[in-house]
Image (cartoon, grey):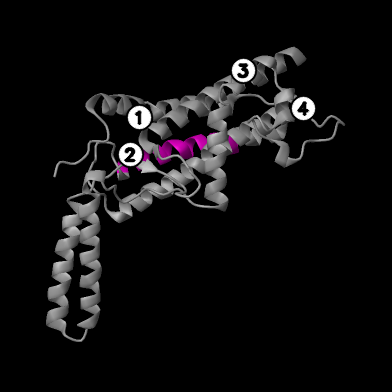
Amino acid sequence: MEKKVNYNDDDLERIYDDFRTIKERRNLLIEKFVKHKCKDNRSSEYMTQGFSRRISTLARCIDNIFSYLPPENNNVPEDNLRKDAEINLQAFVFNVFGAIDNLAHICVFELDIRKPNGNELPASWVGLDKSNRQVRKGLSEGFSTFLVGFDEWLDLQSNYRHALAHRIPLYIARYAVPTKAAEKYEELSQRITVMQKRMIENISNTEEFWRLAGERKELENAQLDLVHFRPTMIHSFTENAPEIIFHAQILADFRTVEEIAECFLVEISECRKVEL
């Protein structure tokens, strides 16, 4: 049976054109952060040891995911490769959220954003999404308006991070069953269940047990001929979580972090110029 193609040739060209630039962009962004002069020592640590490390981790996760599960692959992957890709996706999601959180903390330190009564903001108040109203109020109108354009993306990152930490971890399905093959797939599943029961009944009969095991393997292979691999991630099947094609998503997420980081640098640099 012909396998479902996940990306066409144009998709793959765009994906790999973007992928090949990741390391250079990582290096340029880290260089900007390491060289930036902060007025608060806490900011300096968040810039160099926080955000910069996270950007490096994001780039490495992307490299690993593309190695374990290349975008052009449509075959059902080995379980270990799929699991390694899952682990890197989970690390990627955590560090995207963490990178943005680092930027929020630096804004608070560098712009001296405080509670209305002058006290420091609690850690739970620090962030860049729309729920972090006190932080947004402390930003320039330009940067605050810029962030509004990313509200939906920031909400999605928060959703995935909290699901990963507290509820259901990100999951890559081993394969997908086409609708037209669902009935045949279910029939084979029932036959496999019957075969497994017969194997247990004949566990003391070595010859018969292994003959049945061979038949079960043939049924499992027949099932695999009906399915295809889809490079998607999801964290819950009961919470109406979106199913996301992850190659394109992680590249887009990396670029979004870059874009926010570049505007963030302008924000804290302009503030420092005003003070000087």
**Real-space CA distance between mark 4 and mark 2, rounded to the nearest whole angstrom:** 41 Å
Determine whether 214 is above or below 250 in the image.
below
**Real-space CA distance between mark 1 and mark 4, rounded to the nearest whole angstrom:** 37 Å
Viewer-nearest residue: 150 or 176: 176
Viewer-nearest residue: 5 or 69: 5
Residue 117: x and y, percent? 87, 31
**Real-space CA distance between mark 3 and mark 1, rounded to the nearest whole angstrom:** 26 Å
Give left or right: position of 4 versus 251.
left
**What amino acid does circle 3 point to?**
Val
Question: Which SS type dominates the magenta stretch?
Answer: helix
**Real-space CA distance between mark 2 and mark 3, rounded to the nearest whole angstrom:** 32 Å
**What amino acid does circle 4 point to?**
Asp
Question: Crowding at label 1, few (<14), some or many (≥20) Cα neighbours within 10 Å?
Answer: some
Residue holding disc 3: 266
- Say if mark 2 contacts mark 3, CB within 8 Å: no
Residue holding disc 2: 66
Q: Earlier in the sequence, mark 2 or mark 1?
A: 1
Q: Quadrant of residue 79?
A: bottom left
Q: Quadrant of residue 134?
A: top right
Residue holding disc 1: 19
Residue 140: x and y, percent? 70, 17
Q: Earlier in the sequence, mark 1 or mark 4?
A: 1
- At mark 1, the secondary structure is helix
